[in-house]
Amino acid sequence: MSEERKFICVSCPLGCGLTVTLDDSGEVTKVEGNTCARGESYARSEVKDPRRVFASTVRVKGGKLPVCPVRSKTPAPKGKLFDITRAVAALEVEAPIKIGQVLIHNVCGTDADIVASRDLEAV
Amino acid sequence: MSGKIDVLIIGAGPAGVAAGIGARREGAENVVVLERDWDLGGILQQCIHPGFGLRTFKEELTGPEYMHRFIKQAHEEGVEFRTNTMVFQIDRDTNTVWTMNKERGIEALNPSSIVLTMGCRERPLGAIRIPGGRPSGIYTAGTAQRFVNMEGYMPGKRAVILGSGDIGLIMARRMIWEGATVEGVYEVMSWPGGLRRNIAQCLDDYGIPFHLRTTVTKIHGQDRLEGVTVAEVDDKMTPIPGTERYVECDTLLLAIGLIPENELSRMAGVDIHPVTGGPVVNDLLQTTNPAIFAAGNVVIVYDLVDNVSDEGLIAGANAAKFALGKIPSTAKRIPVKGGENVRLYSPQFVTGKTDSIIFMRVTHPIEKACKVFATADGEEIYSQRLRYARPGEMNEVKIKADKVQNVNSITIDIQPV
């Protein structure tokens, strides 16, 4: 018995409708509906190890803004996103902050780092 | 800086920063970008989610990261920025731009050319009629985005989102990540306003219900929002009796459309297009005042910031050419017309001096193979097959200058094949 899964590709603004066929052992046998190689790799990752880039803010001490935007440098496991939200919410960082500065290494035991996504001067 | 300003750009969002770069690269000496905020980058500084610049940088950046790269380039190119500087008047006869700044006071600037890059604003609650009270807890999605992402406040704990524009979808996920619940997204049209991928990654990922052909028909609450009534609508967008439902919430976010911000353009006396809400422009992104150019969401609301930056570069370069006396005033004005299924488009004229892209949106979705095309005096000059066409996703018509040298008018459209 093969299984078919349908979802929208989120790799780019086109939003192609993907259909992925899996065999009995859960291996991908076919990807359809994609219009580029990114879609194919997204489809394969989405059925085995779905990941998303996480983006939020951290509280800032002495900065020109009270919060600084952050992101996971690489996509993080989807199932860990809410753990990551809590880890990021608990963090407070002192200004100045540089874009790309690593604020949490391997957040929540994933292989993703949380980095600042803007420069933020101190006041 | 001393001496006359060659190109003066109003607004340091993605269009304005790119316009500065474009103007300097074209050889303009004194290029100044005015920005009313203390910071550069415009609204992208609050768009902290990834999804920007895939085409330009071959990777998906957050808004602040995208602007960081452009601002760095602009500094390297020698663009001058004046922050905390508000333009409060443009005189239409002399093109004098009046500015206000705490240190510099009030100044009257007389540049050789101007680029309008003021962006757009969100349609507010007042733009749609919803009966009921006006308690606190009702915000445009972008205002809520600013609260959460730049000021560190949550607007509420239990949200309903009216309209399915991209900012609303992005804010649905943002609210969830910050611990709030989102009761649903309600869209009056039969199709989503935003990109499909945002429905997938912002709503479907978190099980947020998405209701098409449904709208908010009543607001409940005195001081603070307590709930809304939602109802399905018929083909005329009239609520269908008997379908009303009460949804408890303390926050209502509006993602019901964006409007080009043209208060200054009107003062400057440039023609405003009744459908786009932005200045009428030609393929040089020149308005009906030859010294004034315009680019980005002030002209027509784009889906992608890459397009906004591209248009900014073009407008800046042409404004520089104008300042340097390189654009003849005798340029042709070949009108572009929209066909049956075209809701809006820009530019509305081409000169034939350059290859150009006409950006357009369809009125009605076509969910099957179709083609976007252009004809010049009845002859096809561009055609591109599409798998579908949707109002929420902009289409492009590419016009080659050599195809329009001896034509009287151009028509663009999208039709099933």
Image (tube, rainbow, N blue to C red):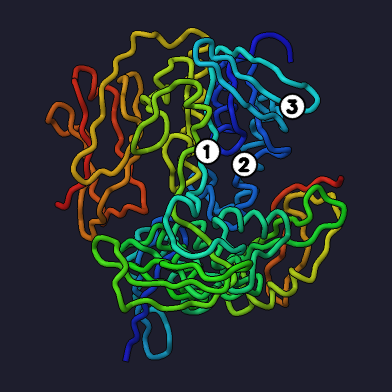
Does dot 2 land on a helix, a strand or a loop?
helix
Along the line of sight, which residue is nearer the eye, A22 or B400? B400
The crowd level at tag 1 (other Cα within 10 Å; few <14, some 14-19, many 20+) is many
* Residue at the image position 54 percent from the left and 65 percent from the top: B252
Q: Which residue is mark 2?
A: B42
Which residue is pictured at 28% across the width and 48% down the height? B362
Depth order, front residue of B253/B342: B253
Which quadrant of the structure image shows residue B163?
bottom left
Q: CA distance from mark 1 to mark 3?
A: 21 Å
Mark 1 / mark 2, whichever is N-terminal: 2
Tell me which amino acid carries mark 3.
Asn
- C-beta proximity under 8 Å, tags 1 and 2: yes
* Image mark 2: chain: B
Amino acid at dot 2: Gly
The Cα atoms of the two marked residues, 3 and 2, are separated by 18 Å
- Image disc number at residue B119: 1
Q: Is residue B143 in view?
A: yes
Q: Amino acid at mark 1?
A: Gly
The answer to whether residue B338 is above or below residue A85 is above
Q: Which mark is residue B98?
A: none
Q: Are marks 1 and 3 on the same chain?
A: yes
Q: CA distance from mark 1 to mark 2?
A: 9 Å
The one nearer the camera, B410 or B102, is B102
Which mark is drawn over residue B101? Answer: 3
Crowd class of label 3 (few under 14; some 14 to 19; many from 20; radius 10 Å): some
